[in-house]
Image (cartoon, helix red, strand yellow):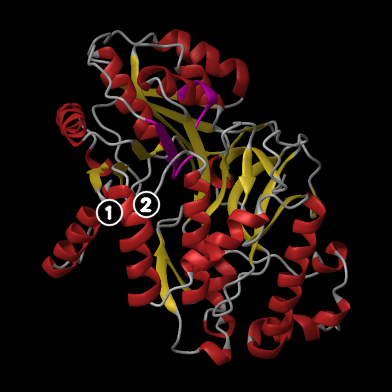
Amino acid sequence: MYSKIYQWVLFPLYESLIMGRKTLQYLRLLQESQWLSEERIRDLQWRELKRLLKHAYRNVPYYRDIFRSLGVTPDDIRTPEDFREIPIIDKQVIRENYRSLIAENYMGRTLTKSTGGTTGIPLQLEFTRDSYEWRRAVMMRHYGWGGYEEGKKVAYLWSVPVGRYSLFSKLKDDLYHKILRQKYFNVFDLTPENMERYYHRMREFKPEHIVAYALQMYYFARYIDENNLEPFPLKSIILGAEAVTKYQKDFISFVFNCPVFETYGCREFMLIASECEEHRGMHISAENLYVEVVKDGRPAEPGEIGEVVITDLHNYGMPFIRYKNGDLAVLSKEKCPCGRGLPLIERVEGRLLDVIRTPDGKILTGVFFPHLMKEFKEVDRFQVIQESIDSLVVKIIPNPRYPNVPIDLIKKEIKKVIGTKMNLEIQLVDDIPLSPSGKFRVTISKITDGNFTL
């Protein structure tokens, strides 16, 4: 009853009348546009992209200079091929050109946020209130595919604020989560003792859904399974924040006996794509983002791995045009039987920095290591670190139930893939810390020999 009152009365009152946001208006548009044909969605994207380019040319010094250096204006951008002439940007470009990337007509009127960053150096971003409302609407639509609705009980196995977090902010957030019937469980502190406590608190809370960091949810499911705890009933689990393997997703679904929905996003744009009820890949939020997958400067073919390049169609305050976020992905060859015209990402392979490279030039995505380690019940957690082109370190936390880790066998299996030219060291450790952004990085590359492309 409360969820219906919240959905139809409290949330619209707060979001539209009190805050003056257009989130629900955009949500209604998105609920309709998802059923358009692929061709009509591409037309919609192109209209929004042309508007953005004209705005950037008139109001953003960085892009004005880019257009002049190319000897073109936005009117000359008539095809996707023309659009690809605009240079790709990345975090380093943003750091070096920060002020000139902010629109002159939005100075002082933007919101700011920071990304944790794979380099450990935070990146501050500017975005408009309107683009935030589009992002919220996208998230509500995509989470809705997993049955999530505002006002229903949801448990978050997620990050919690750290650092300068005032008592007032904490009280405000606590009240907000209470009204929304959300309960947060700190993913930064997922020890066996805390997993026991989280389990009992979630059972008492009785959520309909869990939204969780993917890998941490897998470990939580394993803890429940290995300790013969009775899973509490859920309608769905929504995974995000990091890549998940099919084995991990299937295992979570098996333990909780409910569908698991994979999402893909990043701090720069929030939700980029997610699974629908058919689970045939992740639908791109194409009305809000123009997503390219690029290999060697050209569009990757469906089924071919490439770098993710994104344009935010609604952030006029600090336009992100052809921004490379460091991820690798594969576009799907298939059409989803759900009937939505939104394009599909078949899978996200992992962070570009997390790709392992061997001395003989082999590229090994980080997905290999979870695929291998699932065969060893003696391994509780692990992390792979590439210190140099010929050096690989694998840190393993032994499973207390099966402490005799078969190091020689694991070495043998990894050597089959990386070859004989790379030195391999396996370390048994007591703990592996999360990254500064709170994510557990399965593979870390410390190679800094310039920009690597596939």
Q: Secondary structure at mark 2?
A: loop
Q: In the drawing, does residue 207 fall left or right of residue 170?
A: right
* Magenta-drawn stretch contains 240: yes
Tell me if residue 217 comes above or below residue 90 in the rendering: above
Question: Can residue 129 be spotted in the picture?
Answer: yes
Q: CB atoms at circles 1 and 2 under 8 Å apart? A: yes
* Magenta-drawn stretch contains 309: no
The residue that mark 2 highlights is 150
Q: Quadrant of residue 351?
A: top right
Tell me if residue 301 comes above or below residue 76 in the rendering: above
Q: Secondary structure at mark 1?
A: helix
Which amino acid lies under the numbered mark 2 shown in the image of this protein? Glu
Image point (76%, 71%), residue name: 47
Residue extent of the magenta highlight: 235-248
Q: In the drawing, does residue 223 fall left or right of residue 148?
A: left
The residue that mark 1 highlights is 180
| Mark identifier at residue 49 | none
